């Protein structure tokens, strides 16, 4: 028996978007590439954002969850040291290196050890268990701008930069910045958004080995990615302090409902043969086919399904050594840390759905916790690239 539709969910007070029900073409706001015959029945872009922002605003990512321990890189399948070595942010070194990389390299590189520690948790919401994680990143070690550019700007393509098993993030459709700006100006919900990005992506993942062999087919996930940027003012009796934040939502999409949208089918990297689906990458000037993609061309695909919610929050306070008697802040000083929280609900499809629920939760928590290491390592790569130096190898503990 089919579950309630998106509209039935809204009318009955059930979660409208934060669930595994796939959004079809008729559930989305108009787009110039969609059939004109649908436009009279489609929800407006501003109302869609109103509904989504209101629902997301009711979710308290830092409340009502069950802790599942702490993850560090030492806990990964191939253990690593619990920190990443990199040049410090905003140091004069990076600016000098741009102008005189040869001189800079001859004088050596100042580095810092950026610790990686992730809290794992499970949150019950809408009668389902969401797997989640949270991490804190000192503003003296990682700039908010670096996190924002990696996690909250062009999220689909950027996610592929720090997710090893994601070998192709293919954008099928994007709403224009002009249309989104107009929609933002018409928002009436209590929670505000100042900038919005919204796209449909096709995400291709390779699956981990089982008993040392590749038994599982690759997965494809179709998602609507919406990123909302805003600022907030901290309550401070002495001075008003404005801070930045972003929320990124990924919602499952019903790919088959777009069969008659010619432009989307043309951009798709999925080939249908009978009842089977196969990976067929296409090259573009901006995104040429990579070696990894060529290697996986023709692989059979299983469709997976996920919904996720991420919140990036700028540190409440900036560290100023001149105004404190302590030498430096630490990750326990959370007011000086940017916070990255994320939770997800998913099913990878195929035979993996038969795995015990406890095993699925454990593996999901480990996987999303490991994403934090990969993201910070991506920032490390960017910093070393700026100074024209090769980054050090991953640090492994002595055994």
Image (cartoon, grey):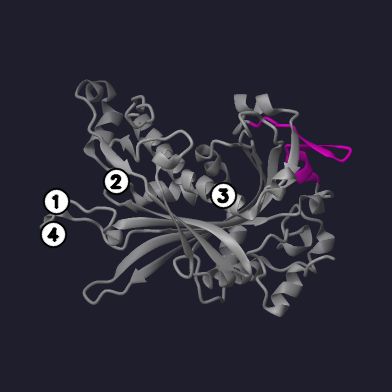
User: Mark 2: which secondary structure?
Assistant: loop
Q: Position of residue 59 (x, y in %)?
A: 53, 69
> How many marks overall?
4
Q: Earlier in the sequence, mark 2 or mark 1?
A: 2
> Circle 1: is it few (<14), some (14-19), or many (20+) Cα within 10 Å?
few
Q: Nearer the viewer, mark 3 or mark 1?
A: 3
Give the Cα separation between the discs numbered 3 and 2.
28 Å
> Circle 2: is it few (<14), some (14-19), or many (20+) Cα within 10 Å?
some
User: Mark 4: which secondary structure?
Assistant: helix
Q: Is residue 14 left or right of residue 193?
A: right
> Circle 4: is it few (<14), some (14-19), or many (20+) Cα within 10 Å?
few
* Mark 3 touches mark 4? (CB < 8 Å): no
Residue at 77%, 68% (x, y): give it. 5
Q: Nearer the viewer, mark 1 or mark 4?
A: 1
User: Mark 3: which secondary structure?
Assistant: helix
Give the Cα separation between the discs numbered 2 and 4.
18 Å
Q: Which mark is residue 327?
A: 1
Q: Earlier in the sequence, mark 3 or mark 1?
A: 1
Q: Position of residue 246 (x, y in %)?
A: 47, 59
Q: Which mark is residue 323?
A: 4
């Amino acid at each position: 028996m089919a579950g309630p539709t998106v509209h039935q969910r809204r009318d009955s007070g059930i979660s409208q978007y934060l669930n595994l029900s796939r959004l079809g073409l008729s559930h989305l706001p108009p787009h110039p590439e969609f059939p004109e015959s649908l436009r009279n029945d489609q929800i407006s872009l501003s109302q869609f954002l109103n509904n989504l922002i209101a629902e997301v605003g009711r979710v308290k990512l830092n409340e009502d969850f069950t802790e599942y321990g702490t993850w560090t890189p030492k806990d990964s399948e191939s253990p690593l040291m619990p920190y990443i070595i990199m040049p410090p942010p905003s140091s004069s070194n990076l600016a000098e290196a741009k102008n005189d990389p040869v001189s800079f390299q001859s004088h050596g590189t100042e580095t810092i050890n950026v610790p990686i520690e992730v809290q794992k948790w499970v949150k019950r919401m809408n009668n389902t268990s969401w797997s989640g994680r949270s991490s804190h990143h000192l503003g003296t070690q990682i700039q908010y701008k670096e996190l924002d550019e990696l996690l909250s700007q062009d999220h689909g393509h950027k996610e592929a930069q720090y997710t090893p098993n994601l070998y192709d993030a293919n954008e099928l459709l994007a709403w224009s910045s002009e249309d989104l700006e107009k929609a933002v100006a018409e928002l009436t919900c209590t929670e505000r958004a100042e900038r919005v990005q919204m796209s449909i992506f096709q995400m291709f993942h390779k699956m981990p080995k089982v008993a040392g062999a590749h038994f599982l087919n690759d997965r494809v996930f179709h998602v609507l990615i919406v990123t909302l940027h805003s600022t907030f003012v901290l309550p401070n009796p002495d001075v008003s302090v404005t801070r930045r934040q972003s929320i990124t939502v990924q919602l499952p999409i019903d790919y088959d409902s777009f069969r008659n949208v010619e432009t989307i089918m043309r951009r798709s990297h999925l080939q249908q043969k009978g009842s089977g689906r196969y990976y067929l990458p296409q090259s573009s000037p901006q995104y040429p086919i990579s070696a990894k993609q060529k290697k996986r061309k023709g692989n059979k695909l299983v469709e997976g399904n996920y919904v996720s919610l991420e919140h990036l929050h700028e540190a409440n306070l900036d560290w100023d050594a001149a105004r404190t008697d302590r030498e430096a802040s630490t990750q326990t000083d959370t007011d000086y840390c940017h916070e990255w929280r994320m939770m997800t609900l998913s099913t990878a499809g195929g035979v993996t759905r038969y795995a015990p629920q406890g095993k699925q939760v454990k593996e999901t928590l480990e996987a999303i916790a490991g994403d934090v290491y990969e993201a910070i390592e991506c920032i490390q790569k960017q910093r070393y690239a700026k100074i024209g130096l090769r980054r050090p190898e991953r640090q492994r503990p002595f055994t």
